[in-house]
Image (cartoon, helix red, strand yellow):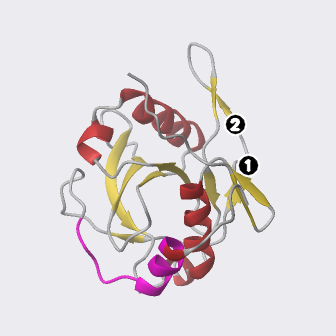
Amino acid sequence: MSNPLQPIPTTYHGYRFRSRLEARWCVFFEARNITFDYEPEGFPLPGGGAYLPDFWLPQVSMWAEVKPSNDLARLAVDREIIHKATVVALGTNHPFVILDGMPRCTNYWTIWPDAMEPVGWDWIDVSPADVRDYHVTEGRFFCCTGASPLDHVELDGDEAAVLAARSARFERGE
């Protein structure tokens, strides 16, 4: 049975996003002064096909993909998402964060290239909403280590940016 809910393409600030959720993340990034490029580059996948990550975040040198579900247990077993994100992370040597669900003050699951790990990568939790503004001062997001990568942990974050993203109104398709 297919999902009857389909994303609504949305234009915001000159970008044509594939969904309102992606546009909400754009609102969040703007409210947090996080620079981004939307779908700047695609990557070939081993065995054929290609993958186009949603965002490049140049301040933190990180790729980002927006997914509608915040059910990380489901994402953890979604081999397609993990495979694509891992290929890009290892191929570019830049971390890849999965922005699952609506923007919120929490940690997000990130694939981090790590030559010390036997598989070549590790999981790190990062928080784009963290009020310490490390993305400005240190060129990185706050790392929330210690939490299970399958758990979201509520953190002290920029609630105004989250509220701006969640309350943004878009005209039908605009």
Camera-side residue: 2 or 50?
2
128 above or below 63? Answer: below
> Which residue position holds label 2?
42
Q: Residue at x 52, y 73 (%)?
A: 165
Left or right, residue 124 beside residue 22: left
Q: Does any portion of residue 132 appear in the rendered image?
A: no
How many C-alpha atoms fall within 10 Å of the one at disc 2: few (<14), some, or many (≥20)? Answer: few
> Which residue position holds label 1?
40
Query: Which residue is farthest top?
Result: 47
Q: Quadrant of residue 148?
A: bottom left
Disc number at residue 112? none
- In reply to whether residue 156 is colored magenta, the answer given is yes
Q: Position of residue 88 (x, y in %)?
A: 55, 38
Q: Does any portion of residue 77 appear in the rendered image?
A: yes
Label 1 to label 2, Cα distance in Å? 7 Å
The region drawn magenta spans 153-166
Q: In which quadrant of the rendered image does the N terminus lie? A: top left
96 above or below 139? Answer: above
Q: Position of residue 54 (x, y in %)?
A: 61, 48
Helix, strand or loop at label 2? It is: loop
- In reply to whether residue 127 is colored magenta, the answer given is no
